[in-house]
Image (cartoon, coloured by chain):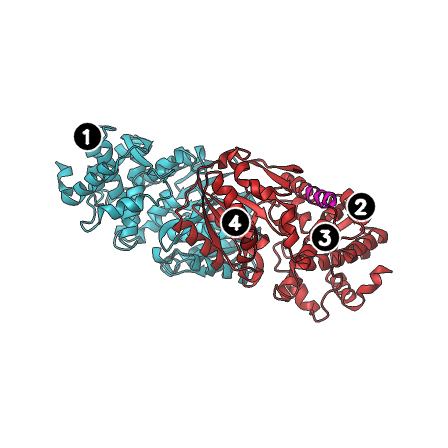
Chain colours: A cyan, B red
Amino acid sequence: MNKTVVSISLPQLAYDVIIAAGGLSFLGQWLSAGEVPPLTAPRKLLVVSNPTVFQIYGPTLIESLTQAGFEVSTCLLPDGEQYKTLESVQTIYDAALQHRLERRSAMVALGGGVIGDMTGFAAATWLRGIPFVQVPTSLLAMVDASIGGKTGVNHPQGKNLIGAFHQPKLVLIDPQVLETLPVREFRAGMAEVIKYGIIWDQELFAALESAPQLDRYEALSESLLHKILTRSCQAKADVVSQDEKEAGLRAILNYGHTIGHAIESLTGYSRINHGEAVAMGMAAAGWIAEKMDLWKADHHHRQLALIQKTNLPTAIPGDLDDEVVLRLLQTDKKVKSGRVRFILPAAIGRATITDQVSSEIIRQVLQQLKASPAQVQG
Amino acid sequence: MNKTVVSISLPQLAYDVIIAAGGLSFLGQWLSAGEVPPLTAPRKLLVVSNPTVFQIYGPTLIESLTQAGFEVSTCLLPDGEQYKTLESVQTIYDAALQHRLERRSAMVALGGGVIGDMTGFAAATWLRGIPFVQVPTSLLAMVDASIGGKTGVNHPQGKNLIGAFHQPKLVLIDPQVLETLPVREFRAGMAEVIKYGIIWDQELFAALESAPQLDRYEALSESLLHKILTRSCQAKADVVSQDEKEAGLRAILNYGHTIGHAIESLTGYSRINHGEAVAMGMAAAGWIAEKMDLWKADHHHRQLALIQKTNLPTAIPGDLDDEVVLRLLQTDKKVKSGRVRFILPAAIGRATITDQVSSEIIRQVLQQLKASPAQVQG
């Protein structure tokens, strides 16, 4: 088995991200073999998932865990970002109470980012914090949400406004589960992969550029997929290890997310998915950086070309009201004393943070991205 | 002004508990003078309180804060343990959104333990954690809830099951506000004071023993009240500083709380208040320790005498079903692998932790505390 381990090293604790095709069948064994010493059996595990994912991968995971001596119960939540709410977390609390989870019990998140974020938040706040394990089943969750300890739910008026930092004890990434991921969600995950190429890892970016195709799981060789997963996780690990609580550096992970969040929010979190919004946000940030002479036009065009090769959008919806977008940017978590902080590219592989972006430039770029998305290929 | 500062020193951070009669009028000045450097004005503060407390002390506090340059908004929640719910926390989230609290904004809890716990939890989970200040107005909150970073709400089926560790930036204790505290709540706070005497500070215990009266605010001299507050806060600071996340030592703070929680829960959190339940729990723990030969009968009787001098109950309700109590103990957070962990006194000033208490002893003591509470004075 091709098994790579990326280690996340934080001041207070350390944990591993295991990337292994077929690893789903080995989670119980790895936990009980003491790969994650504080989680050895016997103990109670609450597996949280959604019906879609659980139907396909639940039985394999549960069997692996029970075989290893864990006492396993499950909690299924409806599938979709609109269910990433305090109400869903209450359902997890109810299951935790029903199965009498103790402080040494653990939760296991089997699903995409929504399941991972909610399970992490429930684990962070049940009995003031119990351990949890991430088993991400979407590309987005594998390379982003499952690593770094950000957990939480949406407020009716804003994404991820409610949450906590709570690090998992282990992240298990089994690339084979991507086979059943809808193609649109696969592309959404690739948006975050491209992000790492831009802000941190030019070699990853070059590898993506030289791949013949990028827009669906079947088009990727096993080795390229493995590389994408390990380098993306490593990039996130590097950044998070240096700045667990988002005091400084970690903010660069929000590249593409400032305008991206506004677009997601204004389109009701349904028409456009997170990765697509991030792709639009990166395109916007690329334009802003070019207008402010922060990076070369050539790099800007290479970014746009890669986004388009992945079949992700670079144009933003024509019906977005620019002034509403601007107002919404002001309520973003990243606002500091009323000024919007932008993460902008300085080169392929390097990002910078600034609060010097004028509303005028933002307006220009929004107009540009609505009017002529195609010109960027020229 | 008689102003004492007790420092809480934790691995990651430190903060002060200021005990000062009349201090309420100085909070703004102390914050902006940089006594708590990361919280200097200008910044947004959301004061969370309940109508009863806010009507009396809100204006003084708000004036002190606005005079010092802070931008202050308020959020009032209904008064009472039955409102310590996720729904009330959602009301705080809504206010935080409405007033656009940023990461450098802060929340200020003005009220008793319920307000403090909920405000702390909202601050812990808003934008994944913003600063907060505790201004406790009940004796119970002053000597216990406001210090140590435990925040949270109740689950419909259990107290404090949902929560987080989140340390305040400052705790301001103004003893003068106790003047308007109902006498029953004053006594409830004294239960926790007696607890510190038993588990940690025999000098505090002796001071309480030599006071002519203890059962109401007016009966205490200003200097004894100041001593009670500083020594209780110091005791909690000592314990919490050594064990922030309740890995070991901190558990002794739950002295009287194991059976106490069960009694509160079974009586619907209304008939018997927290302090009364703790008094009953301490009486029970004292009996258990005596039966197990863990402490001397003389110490046991001195504890009972002090509880009774404070006009707190040592008898438990006659209608409690012992078997239901025993079952409930099993769902307590302090359960480890199915065994109930008890904090028992070893002497006045010293506690011990054990999971060796048999159900039979618990049954005997429950019977005894129902049948003949008066004999303990003999």
Disc number lying in front (1 or 2): 2
**x, y percentage for residue A239?**
40, 34
Single out the residue that lies furthest toward the right.
Answer: B378
Mark 2 nearby-residue class (10 Å; few <14, some 14–19, many ≥20): few
Confirm whether circles 4 and 1 share one chain.
Answer: no
SS of the residue under disc 2? helix
**Secondary structure under badge 1?**
helix
Is residue B268 found inside the magenta-colored segment of the image? no
Residue in view at x 82 percent, y 48 percent: B210
Image depth: mark 3 or mark 1 in front: 3
Residue B125 drawn at (x, y percent): 47, 48
Q: Position of residue A148 (x, y in %)?
A: 43, 41
Q: Which residue is mark 1?
A: A297
Q: What mark, if any, has residue B218 been given in the picture?
A: 3
> What range of the chain is rendered magenta?
B222-231
Chain containing mark 3: B
Of the residues shown, which amino acid type is indicated by label 3?
Answer: Glu
Alpha carbon distance from label 1 to label 2 = 78 Å
Residue type, label 1: Ala
Q: Are marks 4 and 3 on the same chain?
A: yes
Compared across the picture, whether A88 is left or right of A102 comes to left
Disc 4/disc 2 C-alpha distance (Å): 39 Å
Amino acid on which the number 2 mark rests in the picture: Ala
Residue picked out by circle 2? B206
The residue marked by circle 1 belongs to what chain? A
